[in-house]
Image: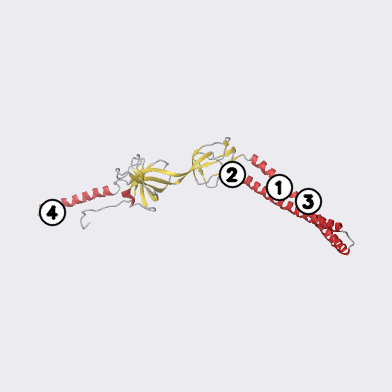
Amino acid sequence: MKTKNTFRRLFSLGQLGGMGLLLLSCGGGSMSDAYGNFEATEIIVSAQAAGQILQLVAREGALLQAGEQVGLIDTVDLFLQKQVLLAQAGAVAAQFPILQAQADVQRQQIKNMENDFARIKNMWCDGAATQKQYDDMEGAWEVAKRQLAATESQRIALHSQQETIRRQAAQVDNNIAKCRIENPRTGTVLVSYAEAGELAAPGKALYKVGDLSEMKLKVYISEAQLAAVKIGQPVEVLIDAPDGGVQPMEGTVCWIAGKAEFTPKIIQTRDERVNLVYAVKVAVKNDGRIKIGMPGEVKFSTNFYLAGAPADL
């Protein structure tokens, strides 16, 4: 009986030891499901106007806010264009009173001719006026009305010219606004391509800004793993620790490729024998530990299995 009890104790200890090894193999000590590198949303900010860069404060490593003005391109030529347009607008506006006075005179002339024509017509009906007098008065009256119509047409043309100048001025204002270099998105300056004093041209890259507050770990998974991964799924992300271990972080699957691609040579997956893999991006809030290009690992699920444990545990 004593020998039989000793055997039971040894068997129970063996079960607990095996269970512990199983916990280590299925828990924190398990292999990661995918590997990759971190990347950030990067934007290359380019000049929208031509001219000398008078100011550019986008230094590498600087944190810039969205909408913040970080530079200025020379606007002297555009300012002079605006002054020319303002002078033209003033000259056009000065013609309106002249045309108004001219139209008033022509209206009075038409009114007078209308009365004269009525008298000539009566005299012509009574035989006191000749046909030529009747025709001359009628023709003069028609000429005066057409002159008034021409004056009104000139006013319409001036209004059109005034609108054209207004739009040209708005275009110049828009070009002046493009000379103000504004940061499009909150982020950190990664690379600076230009300095104050250099010449800028539309499309010339000035600096690159990246949002480092949220990084994305791009990994590749096999088709067998695809069914277990979905957008919005919380996952565990592991990064290298200073002591040679790993540090866990929380992540969320934010993107899954719509089609497969051939396995990149630098990518390792759970099953390296597959030929096609799917790209997946995991969003991770960055507390400063993650850098662009840093390697990372991801576990899509962590399950603990208890096999063969005694019922009283």
- The residue that label 4 is drawn on is 5
Dot 3 or dot 4, earlier in sequence: 4
Q: Amino acid at mark 1?
A: Ala
Q: Amino acid at mark 2?
A: Lys
- In front: 185, or 113? 113
- C-beta proximity under 8 Å, tags 1 and 3: no
Dot 1 or dot 4, earlier in sequence: 4
- Helix, strand or loop at label 1? It is helix
Dot 2 or dot 4, earlier in sequence: 4
x and y percent of residue 116 in the render?
86, 60
- Nearest to the eye among marks 3 and 4: give it: 3
x and y percent of residue 193 in the render?
51, 37
Q: CA distance from mark 2 to mark 4?
A: 88 Å
> Residue 98 — which label?
3
- Helix, strand or loop at label 4? It is helix
Badge 2, how many Cα within 10 Å: few under 14, some, many 20+?
Answer: some
- The residue that label 1 is drawn on is 89
x and y percent of residue 96 in the render?
75, 51
Q: Amino acid at mark 4?
A: Asn
Give left or right: position of 94 versus 260.
Answer: right
- Nearest to the eye among marks 1 and 2: give it: 1
- Which residue occupies the extreme top position in the image? 198
Residue plotted at (71% across, 51% down): 157
Question: Is residue 218 in sight in this rendering?
Answer: yes
- Nearest to the eye among marks 1 and 4: give it: 1
Give left or right: position of 51 versus 141.
Answer: left
x and y percent of residue 105 in the render?
81, 55
Badge 3, how many Cα within 10 Å: few under 14, some, many 20+?
Answer: few
